[in-house]
Amino acid sequence: MKTAGIIAEYNPFHQGHAYHIEQTRQMTGADYIIVVLSGDFVQRGAPAFLPRQERVRMALEGGADLVFELPSTHSCTSAEFFAESGVRLLNGLGCVDYLSFGSESGDISRLFQLADFLVQEPESYRRVLQTGLKSGLSFPAARQAALLECFPDAQTVLASPNNILGIEYCKALIRLQSPIRPVTVTRTGGGYHNTDFHQDFPSATAVRRHILQQPREAQCSEQYHFPMEEEDFSLLFRYLLLTTGKEQLCSIQDISRDLANRIYNCRYRFQSYGQFVSLLKTRELTYSRISRALFHLFMDLQQIPPLSYARLLGFRRCAAPLLGKIKESSTLPVVTKVSTASRILPPDAAALLEQNIRISELYEAVRCEKYHTEFIHEFSRQLIIL
């Protein structure tokens, strides 16, 4: 029984994702595909475009066999934390043979070489990195400059976001000494930020833009499933900014004292979410970096704890043998029903699950307010089974 894992956001699921799943089966000979799916908030620092349940269903209909959740506390993080958390979950299941990810490069040996170099962090690299940081570069920019100093021919590889995320996956596998083997599928169609919807494989950015250009009635239809945007959370952020002091801001994950001062001093200039993030943006602080920090404030996330459980969101009936194997091999407790999870989880894991339930319910509350729909409590959500 061969099993391949994919760490994804499916924000939303599109043709390129279906192609990735299909190619993963062909490349690895996998009998089953496990997807670790972002929670209600995604890596770039934003609410998931579509509700989690919709993305789970799309993943299963698109070829996945099992879908586990990467909780919002771990999915709305930097590429490094995002990758490490997803890899830890797959590794903890104890039955995953391959980790498959898309990349612009398509060269797994090159990506693994760069990952191993970053894990080792030789002195020559650290010296250039520190020089870049002291000059005012953001960490991603300083790291890229340091890598290029050591690998001048890696310019093309390091210029592409999916390559960079792929390197982070490989780093996590190396650090965990995981037996999972990385494989990569070359991306086709629109690039990460490409907005052209009318091509064979449009990017998630293009799909989101296309959907949002439709009339509200179409967005609420069965086809589009009530999309969400950062601006939908503007009123809540205005409230948080007016009721949170500097010291409390400093206690939040990814909010430095300097950023806390900027947030606090600019709080009365808040007009909308996007406008406020742009107001805070500097050469050292990217839009995504600030956005993640603000959503950590929204989550009241003071630190990113170890991922200590695996919540199953859905599966295909044909994957029953794999579920049986996971129950035997997993070193993480598997949660299938949150209302009874406290019986099987240790206290730290139960507290983490409770925090993510609260975050999901805040997302659901904003969605209900926007579309005037009925609130669905996390305890009442059922596994999606196809």
Image: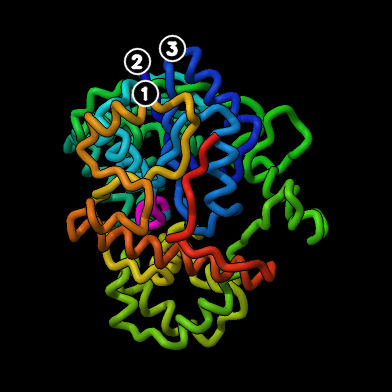
Q: Secondary structure at mark 3?
A: loop
For mark 3, does the 10 Å Cα neighbourhood hold few (<14), some (14 to 19), or many (20 or more) residues?
A: few
Residue position for label 3: 29
- Amino acid carrying mark 2 in the image: Met
Residue 73 within the magenta-colored segment of the rendering: yes
- Amino acid carrying mark 1 in the image: Pro
Residue 260 within the magenta-colored segment of the rendering: no
Q: Are marks 3 and 2 in contact (CB under 8 Å)?
A: no
Kindly report the secondary structure that dominates the magenta region of the rendered protein.
Answer: helix
For mark 2, does the 10 Å Cα neighbourhood hold few (<14), some (14 to 19), or many (20 or more) residues?
A: few
Viewport quadrant of the C terminus: top right
**Range shown magenta:** 71-75
- Amino acid carrying mark 3 in the image: Gly
Residue 50 image position (x, y, % from top left):
60, 52
Q: On screen, 300 above or below 350? A: below
Quadrant in the picture for residue 173: top left
Q: Are marks 3 and 1 in contact (CB under 8 Å)?
A: no
Residue 141 image position (x, y, % from top left):
41, 47
The label nearer to you, 3 versus 2, is 2
Q: Are marks 1 and 2 in contact (CB under 8 Å)?
A: yes
> Which numbered circle lies on residue 1?
2
Is residue 36 left or right of 128 when viewed as pictured? right
Residue position for label 1: 321
Tell me the CA gap for discs 3 and 2. 10 Å
Tell me the CA gap for discs 1 and 2. 9 Å
Of 310 and 123, the residue lying toward us? 310
